[in-house]
Structure formats: C-alpha cells, structure tokens
C-alpha cells in the first residue's frame, strides 16, 4: 500500500482536443521513440517481425464510432489515451512495493523501476488501461509526462514539453499546469468545456479531454435562384457586369 | 522510499549530436532533426525551422529508426540464381552488377533504345532519372504518377496552372471554410493536419467529401458520404446552384480567366468550338468599352461576358456563356442528381449556399498594393476565404480528369484561387500547360531522345503515335486512348510488355515501386507475366533490373537487384526542377545527406545511375575524354547545370554561395545546406504573394530567381480548347485522326467543359450482380509499402479488414465471430476478414491499402499477420476493362490521362463458411534474400 500526497504544488497534465485529433498516431510513435531510449528500461517489442508483434506503448489512439442520439450520420472519434496522472490514483495506492508514486511537486505519477517487481496490480487497478507491463523486462511502464524532457536543460526551452505534444501535427495536445487557473490548459478547459474521463471512477484525473464541436448540423439554407433561364441569366450578367 | 527515484528536475543528456536532413518515410518531405549517440540514431523529431512541417512529425517520421535499422535492408547487389520468384540470389560486387547491366543495356542503346523500359516509381529525383533516360535514348520513361494522381495534376495544370499538394495549398491563416474531397491521408500529411488544427482554432469549418469517414473526415464539421465516382455530378450541381443565384465572381472571371474568350458556336463550321483568334493567333474578347473584338491581353481591355459576335456567318459567344448555358440546364439541378450521388438535394443546396456565403459575405481585404499584368495598379487584395483540397479519391476513377476539372472550375467561379483566404500556388507553380514541354519519343539508335519524355499536349499534333497509328511508347501514353497522359502509365508497362502490345521490350528497369505487389493492379496475373516463359524457355520479358533498399516482394522477381540506401544514408535534392518543398509565400528546396554512413555494400540509386551512365558512355554522364563526369549523386547535385546558372539546388549558388536561384555552381553548396538545417528558403515579396499568374511583382521575382526566363502571365482555362481540338479530330476534322473504335469515346470524354459520365468498369459490369463499390485508403501512419514492415507501425496496423456498412453486415449475417468473407469482382476473388463500420457510404466497402504482404518478403516470418490475415484488394482490380468481344485490350484507365481507375471497382460479398481461415489468394513464399528479423527487440538499450 502506497500513499498519495494530500495535494500537489502543480498539476501537470494534458488537455487533448477530440475536435482536431485526426487519429494519425504521431503521438503514439513519437512517445515510443523518445521513451524507449530514455526513462527506465526500453519499451520492447516481442515477436517484432513475426506472426503477431506486440510491444509496450505508453500512449495509444483508439478509434470509435458514435451514433448521435438525435439521429444523423455516424461519427468517427479518435481517442488518444495515456496515463491521466490522477489525483486519486488507484494504481499508486495498490502498489505493494512503493514503486508507483505521485510526485508532490508536480503531480506526475511515476514508477520507480528499481522497486517494481512486475506484479501488475497497478495495471489492474487503473480503470483506463493506461499502464503496460513490459514483457521482456518484467517492469511496469507508463506515461511519465516526459519528466526527462519538461525540465531538461539540455533541450531548448520551447522543446521542454512531452514528446507527444511537440510532435502532434494537428495541435490537438496541450501541456500545462491545471493547478493554475490562468494556464493555457486551464483556459482551454474553461472555454471548451473540457471533461474528465470516466469521472464516476473517482480517480480525479488531471488530464482533460476537449469534446468535439457539434457536427453535421442540418441546414435548410439554399441559394435564391433568380437566374432560372439562360435568357434571364444573360440579362442578369449584363447588369452585374455594369456594376463592376 | 529509495534514492533510485528520478530527480525532481532531471536533465539527462539528449544526444551527442543533431544532424538535420529531410524525412523520406513518405513523400511529404518534412525537415527532421536526427539525434545521434555513439553513431547510432537515438531519436528523430521534426525541425521547427522547416517550412513543410514546422517542427511536428507524423507517426511514419517518428518510426524512422525502425525503418533505418530494418532487418529487411538489402546488403549487396544480387544476381538471381533460381527461377524468378524463388528469391534465390547470389550476392555480387557492384562491378559485376554494372557489367551485367551494361551487358544488357549497351547493345540496346546501339540498336533499339526503346527496348529499355525505365520506370522509377516514387522517387523524388525525376528531373535526374528522366535526364538519364533521355541520354540513354529510350522513350519509355516515367515515374508513378499514372497510377497515382495524374488526373489531379493534369486537370490542375490544364485548368489553372497547378493542382493541390506540391502545387499549392490553402491560405491556412485566413481561410474560413475548407472543403476536402477524397483525400489519401498519407499525402501532404503534416501540412494538412497543421492547417486543419490552425483553421479550426480560428473558428473555421471543415467539410469532408468522402464515402469513408476516417481521418480528416472524422474531424470534419460536415461529412458528405458521397457515392464513389459521382463527385463531378455533385460539384456541377453546386455550380448550377451558384450560377442560378448569380453567386460567381464576375470581376475575377473577366480579368483572370478565359471567360471572355470568343468561341465559335456554329456546329456546322469546321472551327466549331475553337476560339476566335486574330492573325497573330491571340484569342479575342469583346471589349466592353468599344463593343468590338480585341486581344484578350491588351492593356485596358475589359472583356464583355454578356455580349456575342456575328462574323462571317458565324456566331461567337464568350466561353462563360457556354459554361452558364451548360450548367444552368435542369439536368444539373440537385434534385436530378442527388440520388445518384447518394445525397439529399437539400444537402447539395445547403453546401452550395455555404460556399457562396463564406466566399461573398466573409470577403477579406488586405491593404497591399500590387500591379497586374496589364499594368493596372490595385490598392488592395480581395480574398474569398473558401479553400479546397482533393486527392486520389476523386482522381482514381475513369471520369477523374473531368471531375478534377469540375472542382477547379468551382474554385475559379468562386474567385477563390490565388487570393487571400483561398487556394494559393507554391513556386514554381502556377505554370500553365503552354509553359510545360511537349512530350517526345524521337528515337535514334546510339543517340539521346529528341527531347523530354513527358509534357502537356495542346492538340493532336503533339500525340506520340506512328503513322500507322501505333503507339511510340510501351505504356501507350499520349495516344488516342489517353491523349493527355502527362505522367505516363506505369501500371500498363508490364502488361503491355508481356503482350508485346505495342511492341516487345528487352529490359525492364524499375526503382522504388512495388510492381509485383501492392503498386500494381492485378497482382497475381502480373506475377505470372514476370515469370512466364516463351516457347524457347526464355522469360517473355527477358531482363528485369530492380533497385530497392529493402527486400520487397518485387525483389524476388528481378534478375539483378541494385541495393539502395536508407533515407538517412543518402544524398538527395528536393529540387525546384522537380517537386520542391516550396510554400505559398516562399521558394524553397532541400537536401538529404548521409547523416549515418551505410554499414552495407549499398549505394544510392542515383549514384548507381551516375556510374552506369558513365559505363554506357551516356552524354551528360561522361567528360569529353570519356571519363566519368559525376562521381556520385552529390557531385551531380552540386555541379550539374540545367540551364546556365540554374541547377538542381537553387540556394547558396555562386563561388561564394551568396547567390539565390541563379548562379554558378558552388563547390561547397551541400555543406551550406547542411549548415542551414538541410534546406534553403527565399521569401516572395509581400506585393507578389497573391494573384501570382497575373501579378507583375510575382512574375518579376520568378524570373529573378530563375523559375522561368521571361514573365509569362496567363489566364485560367474555364473552357479548355486543347480538349476541343481532340474532340474535333474525332468528329473528322484535320489530318491526325483517331482510330474508328475510339472515335465515339474521344467525342464523349474530351469535352472542353467538364462532363460527368459513368465510370467505365461500372458501365461494363452487371450492377445487380456486383452492387458494391470497393475502395482502398492508406493509413496516415503508413505510406504505400514502405512503412509496413516497420516493427512499430506494423503493431498499429498489421492486419487489414474490409470495412462494410451496417446494411451489408446485417444482410449477410456477419458477426464478430463469423467475419470471413469472399469478395468477388468480374476479374477475381479474394478471401478476407470484414468489420462493420457505419460512418460509411451505404453501398461502399473499403480497406487499408498495402497492408497485405507476400510470404517471405520484408524479412518477416512466413506466418506474419500481414500474409495470413492481411490482404490486397489489388487482386480484384484488372489493368484492363472486361473484354468487349472486339479482341482489343481496353485499359482500365481514365480516357484523358490514362490514370489507373483503381476506384471504379465493383464487387459482391458472400459470407465464408465457419472454419479456420487464412486470407486468399495465399501465394507461396519466396525465399528471403536477407533472412528473417530478430524475434524480440528492445531498441534503446544501448543508450542506457
């Protein structure tokens, strides 16, 4: 049993815009690429060139179809998902060794891999399926919010953001401090009605999702077709040319 | 708590060094920062300074490490030892490889250069490879455009001097309504995603037109799930609505298009449908000031679009009147065409109304003074913030050219091309058809070809046909079957060579196109054509040289394999002579350079061509003393001059590297590019950034940096006279006549104003028997076959299923457990898995392209998911139309450009009985020439 901090100084996390995420997986692969060479053991791939390859990823995009309740055509939703760095993170409290912890200074949930015995309880406890046990190393892997980028003085200041945010082509991922009401992410959540994922689970996730704008709104607009006949058209044309 | 936790503010070392080059995980040409540690690639990110991607990087680009270190990389030149397709090879030296190649090619050059067919697929060095082919003297050269999007490219050039993607882009900062048709989501991938994010952030709206709601259509505010092949009907119905309401930009049309050109309107006259020209050949308009005919380009002349002229018993009408008469016809009313398009009439009307509202009620004005081509000064620039983009979805049909034309005409009627908020060209475009070369096929043994292979014909006199009417080119480009085949027909080369129609060839030489697998139509049959022998026991296509970096399916069918490098090991130039990386506000080009040295005995294909060209003594590849002229491709890039002062790279020219565009070769040019982050950019002055075809400032700037040698303003072609010239010949006028069996087709399809007609395969098949449209798309995270063996990307999409709409799913009784199906076309049958998708046109099925792999290819295990569960739709698509009983081979291609009509496919679906399943056809394995990849990987261990 590991305890959570009663509060954190910052609440660093992501605001993910479902209105602009086109489901391109850029964030998925850039995350893998950065993290396999950085924090902790590599993100390995089993059977990499075989029948059914499967490896560890810290971030995945799921695609769903939604049928609007009011009728209308089906919609496709691309839904990127990684650790939401919950305030009430059940993955931390369930950890028998103290390897999983939430940082007091910024709220990031991390795994101290040296103390992880790979029991997998945290992955079971996470209602979002955001943790993956690396099969080769037997160590639990999860999003670190690129803790090795966001403070990294070897990176230019503008690059001190998570890899997924830096690479997202559609600008659908935003990084910031949700504890600060004036931060970019707090403002976006306020403007766009950002939501918690599965709030009923009581995890108090830090990451927020910005919902898609209304789509396929029926319109009865039509142009007023005054130039119905070719002859009427010529008369209109002549008049219209005069006005130029 | 232990002390092994990460520090509160960790600052680990990122890498030893960053090298900046250009990505090649797709054809998008983004700038990348390659981080190296101990000489190994540790991390690849987007280059923030780069004009294309501005720092972002897609999934493909981010998976570059797995591509660069892929176990499927070829290691040495290969000589075939077993039968074709067996995969049995012997590794040989480059010297021996060149000996073999020259042994085949040198005698051909001396006797019959056309017996070499050299087609280069998806390379980005076409100005170089075409230069090589021209020096060799074969007329049989092209790249992959014929099976990709030539309809889009050619319709764009012919109509307005450029199309989408490399030709131009929306004014993302100002556009308010973006309409996107049938887009392959892997093309122009980062710029479109950046743009959509930006314009949505500005409150703009996106309308997606696509039978399939994935990717960009998923984020579209409005989705129009149109029936495949009917886009032109939809567009022309919107044009009908706009004309009826007078919602067209008349000022723009009269100034910047051929709307005012007088067209002979007497059906009995020999010149019916042609422009009235003066004795200099200049088209005439009626000047509003005088009411008299005048040269359209004369200073002060303002064309009258409402008048007409009687002269010599003939009535001449402005082209715009013909256009209006045509599309005002009730046949184009939304109510008349809505069912065919699978849309409601109201949806079409509302979309037209929305386009008109944004174009005319949300007009933008920039306070930028500029001078037009007639010397008239303008205080402001007026913008219509409606922009469009389209790609293969509308072009890969046999009515695709006319559909693409229709879309450009819609853009032009709205006055939204080359204006603020609209669609903008990127240098060296705009460039009208007249400014492009004409096609050439003049063969002389032992000599170079008489001119460039590809170009833009303006009439029957530019076709490449012999006096007996036979084709000069192996792919029958520029014949009456497809007169404007500006990119050639790569998809017909193997089939025609095998059939000896129009003639037999000796050596097939290909690069970077998987023509024995996913890049070809009719995959199983094409494999047979490559492996079939004649009565003497020789292969029907005698020699096949192939260059690839990886052990792709096609490698197994080649006699000689030239191993290419990975994209991180090579020199390249993304050149203004070719397909550059320019932006609407800047000219730009870029390089690739070996940020990592190859650890195998491989060579960039272009460097191999420098060697081979010298060995063959090709002009341009040898010095006067016969010695090799270019040591490698880098040498060529830096020292070749196409015209005096104009070379492959426009930046850092001159001995001191201080000249832009024009200047002497600079021996340190490539280093200057490296020092500048791998690219060069030259911004267009503010007053030259819009109205480029008609803007004096732009024309002057373009001449200054060497895009062209003299100002060449022009007007857009609403009415396309070259089409009419072909059509007129088919009516019996002129000396150059189409064969009788093509006469009616030319008349029906070469209309100077776009017309919709039913796609050919659809018209030929029994629609009751084959009621379903079948399409492919490419995932955003993969590109053709290049990325599909990638260890990371194949985990995202390693199995493709056929997505079918709920109606068909229910009708056929599919369930999650019983989801295998037989899919049949008139041509073939496959077995695959299906999945339900409701955000889909109800008569359409689709799958991801190029996921299926052949057993033994790509260093994958023979039971790889791509081979056992993945599949190709290509097996169902023939390169020929169903036989008509006339003994002729009718290409399954667009009749204007020859573009492969991939998306005309019609199928039927039946549920497979329960049991154990693998996808079919299950072709036997080829032996892997590179072995198989490792079982497990943990990339990054070495950096810990």
Image (cartoon, coloured by chain):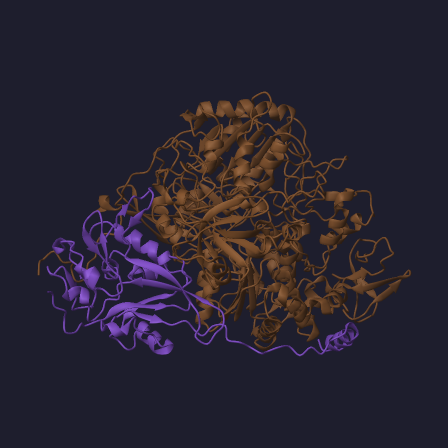
Which tint was used for chain A? purple
- Residue A79 seen in render: yes
**Which residue reaches farthest right?**
B313
Where is residue B363, by image quadrant?
bottom right
Where is residue B155, by image quadrant?
bottom right
Q: Position of residue B844 (x, y in %)?
A: 54, 58
A214 or B808, which lies in front?
A: B808
Residue at (51%, 28%) from the top-left corner? B612
Q: Position of residue A210 (x, y in %)?
A: 36, 72
- Residue B426 seen in render: no
Q: Position of residue B6 (x, y in %)?
A: 16, 58
Where is residue B624, by image quadrant?
top right
Left or right? Give the position of A167 relative to B896.
Answer: left
Residue at (68%, 46%) from the top-left corner? B482
B696 or B265, which lies in front?
A: B265
Q: Position of residue B666 (x, y in %)?
A: 48, 41
Task: Look at the picture and state if B297 lies above or below B657.
Answer: below
Left or right? Give the position of A19 relative to A189.
Answer: right
Left or right? Give the position of B881 relative to B596.
Answer: right
Q: Which chain is brown?
A: B
- Specify the quadrant that holds the N terminus of chain B: bottom left
């Amino acid at each position: 049993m590991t305890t959570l901090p009663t509060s954190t100084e910052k609440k660093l996390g992501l605001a993910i815009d479902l209105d602009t995420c086109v489901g391109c997986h850029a964030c998925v692969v850039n995350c893998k690429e950065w993290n396999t060479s950085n924090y902790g053991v590599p993100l390995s791939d089993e059977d990499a060139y075989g029948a059914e390859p499967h490896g560890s990823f810290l971030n995945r995009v799921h695609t769903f179809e939604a049928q609007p309740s009011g009728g209308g055509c089906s919609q496709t939703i691309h839904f990127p998902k990684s650790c939401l760095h919950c305030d009430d993170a059940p993955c931390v409290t369930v950890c028998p060794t103290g390897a999983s912890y939430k940082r007091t200074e910024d709220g990031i949930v991390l795994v101290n891999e040296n103390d992880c015995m790979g029991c997998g309880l945290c992955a079971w406890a996470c209602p979002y399926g955001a943790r993956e046990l690396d099969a080769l190393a037997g160590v639990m892997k999860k999003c670190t919010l690129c803790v090795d980028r966001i403070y990294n003085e070897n990176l230019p200041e503008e690059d001190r953001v998570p890899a997924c945010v830096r690479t997202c082509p559609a600008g659908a991922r935003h990084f910031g401090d949700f504890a600060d009401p004036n931060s970019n992410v707090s403002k976006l959540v306020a403007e766009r009605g950002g939501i918690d994922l599965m709030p009923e689970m009581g995890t108090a996730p830090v990451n927020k999702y910005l919902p898609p704008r209304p789509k396929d709104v029926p319109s009865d607009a039509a142009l007023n077709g005054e130039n119905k006949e070719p002859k009427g058209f010529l008369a209109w044309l002549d008049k219209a040319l005069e006005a130029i | 708590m232990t002390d092994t936790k990460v520090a509160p503010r960790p600052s680990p070392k990122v890498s030893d060094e960053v090298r900046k080059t250009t990505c090649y995980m797709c054809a998008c040409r983004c700038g990348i920062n390659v981080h190296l540690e101990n000489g190994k690639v540790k991390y690849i990110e987007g280059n923030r300074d780069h004009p294309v991607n501005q720092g972002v990087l897609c999934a493909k680009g981010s998976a570059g490490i797995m591509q660069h270190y892929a176990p499927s990389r070829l290691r040495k030149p290969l000589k075939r030892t077993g039968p074709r397709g067996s995969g049995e090879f012997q590794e040989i030296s480059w010297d021996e490889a060149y000996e073999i190649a020259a042994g085949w090619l040198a005698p051909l050059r001396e006797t019959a250069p056309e017996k070499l067919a050299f087609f280069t697929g998806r390379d980005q060095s076409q100005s170089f490879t075409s230069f090589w082919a021209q020096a060799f003297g074969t007329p049989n050269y092209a790249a992959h455009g014929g099976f990709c999007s030539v309809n889009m490219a050619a319709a764009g050039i012919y109509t307005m001097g450029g199309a989408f993607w490399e030709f131009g882009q929306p004014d993302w900062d100002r556009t308010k309504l973006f309409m996107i048709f049938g887009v392959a989501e892997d093309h122009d991938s980062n710029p479109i995603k950046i743009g959509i994010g930006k314009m949505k952030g500005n409150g703009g709206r996106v309308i997606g037109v696509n039978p399939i709601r994935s990717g960009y259509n998923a984020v579209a505010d409005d989705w129009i799930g149109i029936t495949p092949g009917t886009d032109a009907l939809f567009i022309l119905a919107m044009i009908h609505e706009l004309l009826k309401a007078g919602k067209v930009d008349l000022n723009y049309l009269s100034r910047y298009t051929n709307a005012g050109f007088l067209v002979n309107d007497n059906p009995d006259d020999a010149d019916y449908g042609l422009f009235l020209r003066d004795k200099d050949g200049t088209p005439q308009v009626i000047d509003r000031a005088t009411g008299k005919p005048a040269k359209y380009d004369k200073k002060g002349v303002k064309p009258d679009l409402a008048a007409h002229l009687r002269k010599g018993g003939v009535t001449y009408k402005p082209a715009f009147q013909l256009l209006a008469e045509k599309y005002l016809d009730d046949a184009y009313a939304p109510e008349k065409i809505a069912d065919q398009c699978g849309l409601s009439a109201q949806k079409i009307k509302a979309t037209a109304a929305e386009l008109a509202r944004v174009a005319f009620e949300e007009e933008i004005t920039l306070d930028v003074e500029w001078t037009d081509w007639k010397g008239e000064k303008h205080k402001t620039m007026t913008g219509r913030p409606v922009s469009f983009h389209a790609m293969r979805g509308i072009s890969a049909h046999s009515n695709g050219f006319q559909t693409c034309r229709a879309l450009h005409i819609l853009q032009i009627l709205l006055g939204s091309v080359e204006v603020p908020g609209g669609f903008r060209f990127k240098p060296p475009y705009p460039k009208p058809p007249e400014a492009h070369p004409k096609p050439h096929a003049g063969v002389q043994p032992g000599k170079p070809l008489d001119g460039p292979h590809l170009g833009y014909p303006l009439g029957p006199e530019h076709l490449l046909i012999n006096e007996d009417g036979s084709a000069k080119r192996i792919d029958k480009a520029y014949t009456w079957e497809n007169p404007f085949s500006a990119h050639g027909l790569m998809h017909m080369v193997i089939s025609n060579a095998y059939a000896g129609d129009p003639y037999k060839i000796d050596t097939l030489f290909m690069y970077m196109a998987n023509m024995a697998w996913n890049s070809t139509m009719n995959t199983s049959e094409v494999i047979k054509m490559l492996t079939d022998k004649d009565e003497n026991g020789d292969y029907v296509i005698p020699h096949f040289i192939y260059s690839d970096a990886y052990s792709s399916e096609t490698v197994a069918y080649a006699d000689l394999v030239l191993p290419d490098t990975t994209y991180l090991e090579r020199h390249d130039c993304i050149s203004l002579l070719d397909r550059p990386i320019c932006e609407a506000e800047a000219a730009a080009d870029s390089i690739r350079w070996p940020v990592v040295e190859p650890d195998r005995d491989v060579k960039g294909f272009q460097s191999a061509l420098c060697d081979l060209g010298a060995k063959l003594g090709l002009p341009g590849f040898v010095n006067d003393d016969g010695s090799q002229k270019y040591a490698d491709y880098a040498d060529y890039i830096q020292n070749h001059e196409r015209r005096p002062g104009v070379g492959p790279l426009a930046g850092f020219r001159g001995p001191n590297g201080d000249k832009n565009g024009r200047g002497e070769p600079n021996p340190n040019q490539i280093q200057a590019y490296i020092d500048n982050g791998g690219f060069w950019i030259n911004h267009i002055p503010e007053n030259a950034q819009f109205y480029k075809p008609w803007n004096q400032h732009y024309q002057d700037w373009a001449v200054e940096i060497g895009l062209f040698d003299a100002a060449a303003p022009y007007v857009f072609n609403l009415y396309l006279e070259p089409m009419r010239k072909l059509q007129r010949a088919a009516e019996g006028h002129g000396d150059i006549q189409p064969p009788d069996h093509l006469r009616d087709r030319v008349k029906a399809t070469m209309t100077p104003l776009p017309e919709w007609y039913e796609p050919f395969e659809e018209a030929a098949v029994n629609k009751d028997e084959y009621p379903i449209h079948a399409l492919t798309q490419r995932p955003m995270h993969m590109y053709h076959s290049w990325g599909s063996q990638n260890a990371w990307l194949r985990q995202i999409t390693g199995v493709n299923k056929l997505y079918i709409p709920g109606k068909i799913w229910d009708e056929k009784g599919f369930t999650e457990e019983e989801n295998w199906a037989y899919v049949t076309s008139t041509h073939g049958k496959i077995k695959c898995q299906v999945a339900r998708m409701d955000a889909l046109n109800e008569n359409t099925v689709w799958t991801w392209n190029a996921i299926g792999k052949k057993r033994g290819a790509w260093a994958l295990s023979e039971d790889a998911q791509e081979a056992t569960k993945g599949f190709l739709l290509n097996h169902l698509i023939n390169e020929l139309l169903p036989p008509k009983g006339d003994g002729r081979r009718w290409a399954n291609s667009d009749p204007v450009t020859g573009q492969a009509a991939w998306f005309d496919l019609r199928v039927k679906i039946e549920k497979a009985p329960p049991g154990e399943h693998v996808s079919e056809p299950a072709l036997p394995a080829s032996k892997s020439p590179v072995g198989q990849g490792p079982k497990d990987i943990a990339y990054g261990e070495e950096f810990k």
